[in-house]
Image (cartoon, rainbow, N blue to C red):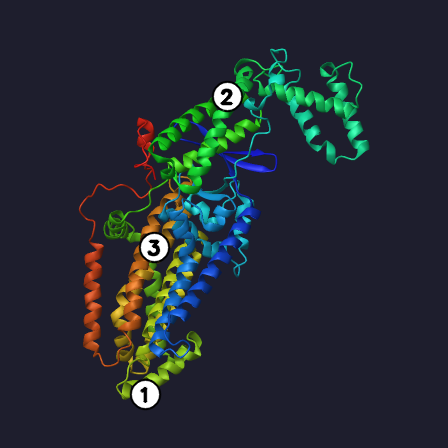
Amino acid sequence: MAIATRPLEQTVDVETPELVLLSYSIAGVGSRVLAALTDLVIAVVAMLVLVIALAVLAPGFPSTNAASLGWAAAILILAQFAVVWGYYVLFEGLMDGQTPGKRIHRLRVVREGGFSVTFGVSAVRNLVRIIDMQPLLFYLVGLGSILMTRRGQRLGDIVAGTIVVREALRAPAMPLASAVSPDESAEAPALQTALSEDEFRVLDRFVQRSAALDPLRRAMLAGQLADRFAAALRQDDERSLPAQLADLHERERRARARGVSSRGETGAGRERQALIAASEPRWTHFAALLATAQKRGLRSLGEEGVREFVAEYRALAADLARLRTAAGSHAVDELFHLGRLVAGAHNLLYRDRGMPLRSAVRFLFTDVPREIRRSAAPIALATLLLFGPALVAAVAVVRTPGLAKEMLPAGMLRRAEDGVRRAREGEGYIDDPQLFRPVMASSIVANNVQIAFTAFAGGVTAGLLSALILIFNGISFGSVIGLYVSKGIGPLLLAFVAPHGVLELSAICVAGGAGFLLTSALLMPGPRTRRRALVENSRRAVRLVAASTLLLLVAGAIEGLVSPIEWWPLEGKLAVSGTTLVLLVVYLRGGRRRVVAAPLETVPVRASLALGAVTARRAP
């Protein structure tokens, strides 16, 4: 992938399967910030609408009963979590790399190579956002990464292998050949223009800026250009030099629009203007088709329209290759414009179809368990970093109970003191207000999943953040165990933790393993480049994150709805724990039979393009 620059614009070149180089304009910091602010406003408005809707739909609000308020609060907690973590992933997956904010500001996320993003790729780039937004939601890490990388990538883009590009089509500076008037067409034909391509560009810049220059500066530049272009100026023209230069500029523009080659061009370069003049009407027609397809989807074109679109895409790809050869080292505006058209069509035709239900089921119950087994080493490391400190902390607190004051917050110490009374009176680990169990369950799910996401994203810090999260959670967990054991009320804690503990702790270890997959790509990439290793390992890691999320959803529901029940005996809670362990083992054994499955990163119309048989039914 080559990086190129135009005046005030950074571009990146990618090669398509048709062996045509496409140029994408890298989105700048300003446009990305505007898109992010737009998405933030939309997300806040969506949350306000949800709050109002719940208030209106709740019968008898605000005097609604406590049970209804509890469920409403649970819905709000889950909705907030979904907006924070799911907004970008959902929209980028469904809208081909665009959130509403990106669509308004004509930005799009694409994979390196120009292919559309999948849900998995979008999940990776957006989960790493928790690192990009540091410190304290100011996004200094992300902004710094965008400014320092050649492709304007924040950390999430680097890990996911994506770039954010601008889609606004830039019209060529030269008018269409079809716009040339009859009088202009009647002018005596010329074999070449009076000015070379470089000379015309100098003159064009002067004419475009002339009105903004002060008179003295304009007169000085006009004199210099008149001396340089004296042979091309009309000798009998008595107008001012700026007017003469404007007339020369117009004559040169007309000649180029008729296809006359520039002076001094040789070989393929002599055909450049002729190619532009002959082909630009088709390019304009295709631009209209592309605008419709980008706004409404390819299906809106109908079957014949899609056939025409694919045929024109091939024709424009060929034109782009010819024009690139003819342009040589010149930065031709028409080349840039044609590249935008072909790139936009490429994104549509190579768009991923998403993940149908059958593929989603296969992903969760075949691909994910298989990846967990494959990633046993990083998961084992995460397990060691979680349970090792937990064991040390538990033993230390049991032997020296005074350490608990240094290792646990005051609230947990008070809960343990109250736990002595609760154990004596036959009560549970905590009060069990059944009306607020939904709130507890949703809060637990949101908190635990965010910890798992952070453990995964921490892999880009060379594993330091992931390791710290695991170690500190292990110390905290072990200290609590040691505190309750030292007070002789260990069974009280066990009765609460047992139902959900197997799934919750397993999920944290799996998420930590996902983070260490990123770490291994950074520290031990092997024969791959670090960038390539990060992208490949991130696609494996996202499967582990999916597994961790699934386990935490189930564990959170159990922790909020089952674990607090006071009247269940310890044996019943242990039975639930055993059942979850058996189900987890069965789940992890899934996908052992070799299944030939389409990968998540598919290109649905590649073969169709090669065969020339794309129809509206097969188009995404």
Question: Which numbered disc, 3 or 1, marks the residue that appears first in the sequence?
Answer: 1
Specify the amino acid type for callout 3: Val
Nearer the viewer's eye, disc 2 or disc 3?
2
Earlier in the chain: of badge 2 and badge 1, it is: 2
Residue position marked by numbered label 2 in the rendering: 325
Answer left or right for 168 relative to 159: right
Evaluate whether residue 466 shows in this view.
no
- Judge from the rendering whether residue 501 lies leftward or rightward of residue 131; answer left or right: left
Provide residue 265's location: percent of width, then percent of height.
59, 15
Q: Amino acid at mark 1?
A: Arg
Q: Residues within 10 Å of mark 3 (few under 14, many from 20)?
A: many
Residue that badge 1 annotates: 421
Mark 2 to mark 1 CA distance (whole Å): 85 Å
Where residue 458 appears, as percent x and y from the top left, is 43, 56
Quarter occupied by the C terminus: top left
Residues 340 and 133: in front is 340
Locate residue 427, reporting x and y percent. Answer: 28, 84
- The residue positioned 49% from the left and 47% from the top of the image is 102
- The label on residue 56 is none
Numbered disc total: 3
Vertical comparison of 11 with 101: above or below: above
Q: Nearer the viewer, mark 3 or mark 1?
A: 3
Secondary structure type for disc 2 = helix
Query: Label 3, on which residue?
Result: 545
